[in-house]
Image: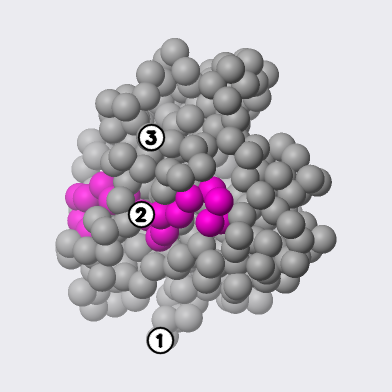
Amino acid sequence: MITQSPTIFLTSATGSQGLNLARLLRSQSPPWSVHATVRSLTSPAAQELSSLGVSLALGSWDDLPALEQALRGCTALFLNLIIDFTDFSHELTQAKNILSLAKAAGVKQVVYSSAAALSSLEEHFDVEKDGSPLMVASLKSKQAIEKEIRNGGWDSWTILRGANFMENLLDPKVAMYPGLKETGVFKVAFKSQQKLPFVDTADIAKFALEAFKNPEGGLKGKEVNIVGDEITPEELMRSLSKATGREMRFQELTDEEVQREKERNPFITAGLAIRVMGKFMKKEETERWGLELTGCEEFVKRNEEAVRKTYL
């Protein structure tokens, strides 16, 4: 257990994971110090961070002076980056810069929110053959960042791998499921009776908090799959129908449709990958850590206003 409250630097602080973690960190007694950079100080997310008491600096992940300033005095880092659609090497460059500046600032612990392990995925899925260029680049980038962290000489590190985000069912991320919002038809490369792994990003934040609370605890040096629920697409649509009063249904793509669509829609290949994630990402393994997890139905109920705004 920590004896003194750490000072945490958050990347992607205005995203769902970052906001959820900021809320948890600032709700500790006494509230932990949290630093972050934002590209706009007036966005709703930045204003919420400010109201929580997060120390904000204006700057991007490429603004090294802003990062250096924001990292000053920090003892731990939450790293959560996204692939650059125009330059697949950019994410790794940003990660290396942030990690280097964090080390220079005296950061001792890193918690990295990554993605499904490429090595595990490749056991069940031909990533090079069936994955889109974006998927392949993203997974390889995150794999390289993981290596940087493992070999970085940190006092403590943890790698978190969330399953398919429940937030992807809400605006604006629901766009990854073409037609779902407009037609109510969930037409993706899933199988109707196959249970798929989902996670609420708030649960990823819970694991990050636990790692920060206990830098020498069970999460030290661990790579953890986080699954909050395993649910079929049909069950998921029933939950959304119940919340909205709108008819919503799942329509399974044929193998021919998958082959045709995956050439022009990278989210189809993501669906193929999510299919096999269920073979190595299991809720029962996540439950062993003893943290409270969120089911899809609970997520829909808790976010009923956002659900209705998305689909009605």
Mark 2 falls on what kind of element?
strand
Mark 1 packing: few (<14 Cα in 10 Å), some, or many (20+)? few
Which quarter of the rendered picture does the N terminus lie within?
bottom left
Highlighted range, magenta: 219-236
Residue 175, image quadrant: top right
Q: Which mark is residue 226?
A: 2
Mark 1 falls on what kind of element?
loop
Along the line of sight, the residue nearer the viewer: 309 or 101: 309
Of callouts 1 and 3, the N-terminal one: 1
Of callouts 2 and 1, the N-terminal one: 1
Along the line of sight, the residue nearer the viewer: 213 or 65: 213
Question: Which residue is disc 3 drawn over?
Answer: 276
Q: Nearer the viewer, mark 2 or mark 3?
A: 3
Residue at 39% in and 68% down? 293
The percent position of residue 291, horizontal first and vertical second, equals 31, 70
Residue at 60% in and 30% down? 253
The answer to whether residue 145 is visible is no
- Residue 46 versus residue 301 in the image, above or below: above
Q: Which mark is residue 29?
A: 1
Q: Hey, what amino acid is under mark 1? A: Ser
Magenta stretch holds residue 159: no
Alpha-carbon distance for marks 2 and 3?
A: 15 Å
Along the line of sight, the residue nearer the viewer: 24 or 124: 124
Mark 3 packing: few (<14 Cα in 10 Å), some, or many (20+)? many
